[in-house]
Image: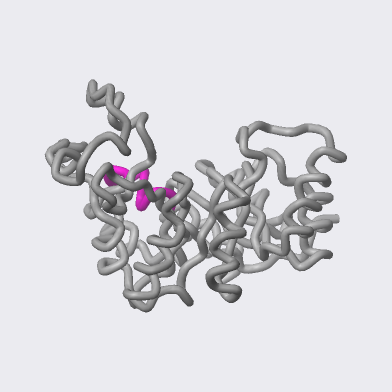
């Protein structure tokens, strides 16, 4: 038996990835128009200490740039033309765009910037509407030390691999429980009935990534997953409507 169906959160992966360029103002504007519960994005720091929203150095490689994000200034990075003429946005721009309209699932991709991210969230008064996630447990522990009330999610495993063995997946869940983070974030392939039941038994909310098909969305909903990190907000909304969960 699966968990009782809930009304999972719809989380737009990197904005509205299937309809607009990822991690851009245009993409996040489109995502907000589609009315998800959260938008998800990745945060890095430039050479001159500015917080920007971009997946990683892989984006620079696509542009033929061999330098890493941390080796380039904001001015240099802003010169890069992304799809449809878009530019790399600052975290502050995304927060200002989203504030009061949608909640934030903010992934910290670089160690050493968590304090600056938290300071900006506080400055913009969006801490309560933000969940911070990371692969790095030390980043999450540092954030909790700074603010015991901040909502945190641990992305496991750090390799992003599929883990078929239940005992190994159970061990991952136990690590999140022991660290007292309220959210566990993992690849949807790692999630089954046992995973959700064990996580929920110990008070964890389960977020699944990255979901592209309606079939997988339905499966995750049937399992009782709490958050769907999706490339198509429209598909997720359609599936929820069909299942009469809204």
**246, 196: nearer the viewer:** 196
> Is 164 covered by the magenta stretch?
no
- Split into 4 quadrants, where in the image is the C terminus? bottom right
In this rendering, position of residue 60 left or right of residue 162: left
Looking at the rendering, the stretch of residues picked out in magenta corresponds to 12-22
Q: For the point 47% across and 68% down, which residue is it? A: 130
Counting from the top left corner in percent of width and height, residue 92 is at 27, 63
Residue shown at 20% from the left, 42% from the top: 73
Along the horizontal axis of the image, is 85 left or right of 215?
A: left
Left-right relation of 202 to 234: right
Residue at screen point 83% across, 34% down: 165
In this view, the residue in front, 122 or 156, is: 122
Q: Picture coordinates of residue 230 (x, y %)? A: 49, 49
Report the front residue among 143 and 26.
Answer: 143
Asked if residue 131 is positioned above or below residue 129 in the image, the reply reads: above
Where does residue 195 sit, x and y in percent of width and height?
79, 50
Q: How many marks?
A: 0
> In the picture shown, does residue 3 fall above or below 86?
below
Can see residue 154? Answer: yes
- Residue 47, quarter of the rendered image: top left
The quadrant holding residue 166 is top right
Q: Which of these two is toward me, 139 or 2?
A: 139
Q: Is residue 230 left or right of residue 194?
A: left
Residue 211, located in which quarter of the rendered image? Answer: top right
Dominant SS of magenta comes to: loop
Q: Is residue 244 visible?
A: no
Up/down of 32 relative to 73, above or below? below
Q: Which residue is painted at 46% across and 51% down in the image?
A: 108
Question: Does the magenta run of residues contain 14?
Answer: yes
Image quarter (top left, top right, bottom left or bottom right) of the N terminus: bottom right
């Amino acid at each position: 038996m699966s968990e009782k169906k809930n009304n999972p959160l719809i989380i737009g992966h990197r904005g509205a990835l299937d309809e607009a360029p990822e991690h851009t103002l245009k993409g996040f504007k489109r995502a907000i128009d589609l009315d998800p519960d959260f938008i998800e994005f990745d945060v890095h720091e430039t050479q001159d200490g500015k917080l920007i929203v971009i997946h990683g150095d892989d984006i620079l490689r696509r542009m033929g740039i061999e330098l890493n994000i941390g080796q380039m200034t904001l001015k240099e990075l802003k010169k890069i033309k992304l799809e449809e003429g878009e530019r790399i946005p600052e975290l502050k721009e995304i927060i200002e765009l989203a504030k009061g309209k949608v909640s934030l699932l903010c992934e910290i991709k670089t160690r050493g910037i968590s304090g600056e991210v938290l300071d900006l969230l506080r400055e913009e008064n969006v801490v309560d509407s933000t969940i911070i996630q990371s692969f790095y447990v030390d980043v999450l522990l540092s954030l909790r030390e700074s603010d015991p009330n901040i909502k945190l999610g641990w992305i496991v495993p750090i390799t992003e691999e599929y883990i078929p063995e239940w005992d190994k997946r159970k061990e991952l869940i136990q690590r999140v429980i022991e660290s007292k983070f309220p959210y566990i974030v993992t690849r949807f392939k790692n999630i089954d009935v046992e995973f959700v039941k064990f996580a929920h038994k110990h008070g964890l909310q389960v977020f699944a990534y990255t979901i592209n098909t309606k079939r997988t969305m339905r499966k995750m909903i049937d399992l009782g997953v709490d958050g769907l990190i999706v490339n198509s907000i429209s598909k997720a909304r359609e599936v929820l409507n069909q299942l009469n969960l809204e």
